[in-house]
Each structure stands twice: as structure tokens, then as C-alpha cells.
Image (spheres, rainbow, N blue to C red):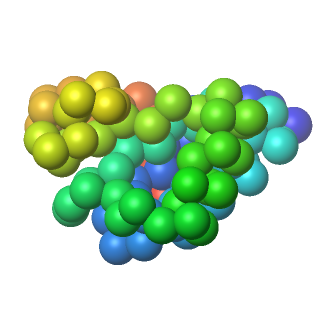
Amino acid sequence: MEEKQILVLARRDHTEAMRVAAGLTIFGHAVRLVFMTGPVAETEENAERAELLELAEVEPETTVPEMAEDLDLLEAAALGRAMTDADRVISL
């Protein structure tokens, strides 16, 4: 199977987006995860998903200024380039 560049946009369900992003790496795809719309809730389930991302070597990014201390902040132009460069975009 050919490696794909996949962009996962975590818009409505951050928890599910983390699960999907980590899972896609199993197939050898290069995955980017971008948190959007608001800060990720600090829950036990999200902490577990964050560990999965770390194991899968997915480094999340964000468009949420409040999260910029912990993650790379993508401005609108950078997000647009990421979407254009991706083979697939998944919005969750």
C-alpha cells in the first residue's frame, strides 16, 4: 500500500480524532492532527488518547491560541497549505 499524507482535523470530537489519527499510522500513513474550535478537555480518556498519539509518533498541532504554549500553532495560511498538501483530509 502506498503511503498517504493524511490530515485529521479535530473540530467536533477531539477524543475521536485522536483515536483515528493514531489508528491511521498502523497502515504506514504519515498523519498530522490539528486541534480546532477550542482547547482539548482534560479528561482521563483524552489523556489515554494522548499517550496513543505519542506511541504512534503523531505530534498534534492547533489553531487554538489558548493551546499554543503546548502545541505548534497553525495560522490560517499554514492550515490551508496543510490541507492542500494532504492526500486525504478527515474532519471529526
Q: Which residue is drawn at 33% across and 31% down?
A: 71
Q: Which residue is drawn at 57% across and 65% down?
A: 44
Residue 65, by quadrant, is top left
The outermost residue toward the right is: 1
Q: Which residue is drawn at 65% across and 34% down?
A: 54
Q: Position of residue 31 (x, y in %)?
A: 59, 37
Q: Where is residue 2 in the image (x, y as percent from the top left)?
A: 79, 32
The outermost residue toward the bottom is: 12
Check the picture and name the quadrant holding the C terminus: bottom left
Left or right? Give the position of 56 relative to 39. Answer: right
Residue 25 seen by the camera: yes
- Give the vertical position of 65 relative to 73 (above or below): below
* Depth order, front residue of 21/6: 21
Q: Which residue is drawn at 21% across and 62% down?
A: 37
Left or right? Give the position of 10 relative to 64. Answer: right
Q: How many marks?
A: 0
* Depth order, front residue of 28/62: 62
Left or right? Give the position of 74 relative to 46. Answer: left
- Give the vertical position of 82 relative to 64 (above or below): above
Q: Position of residue 66 (x, y in %)?
A: 15, 44
Residue 81 seen by the camera: no
* Depth order, front residue of 80/57: 57
* Depth order, front residue of 4/65: 65
Residue 29, by quadrant, is top right
- Give the vertical position of 60 relative to 13 (above or below): above
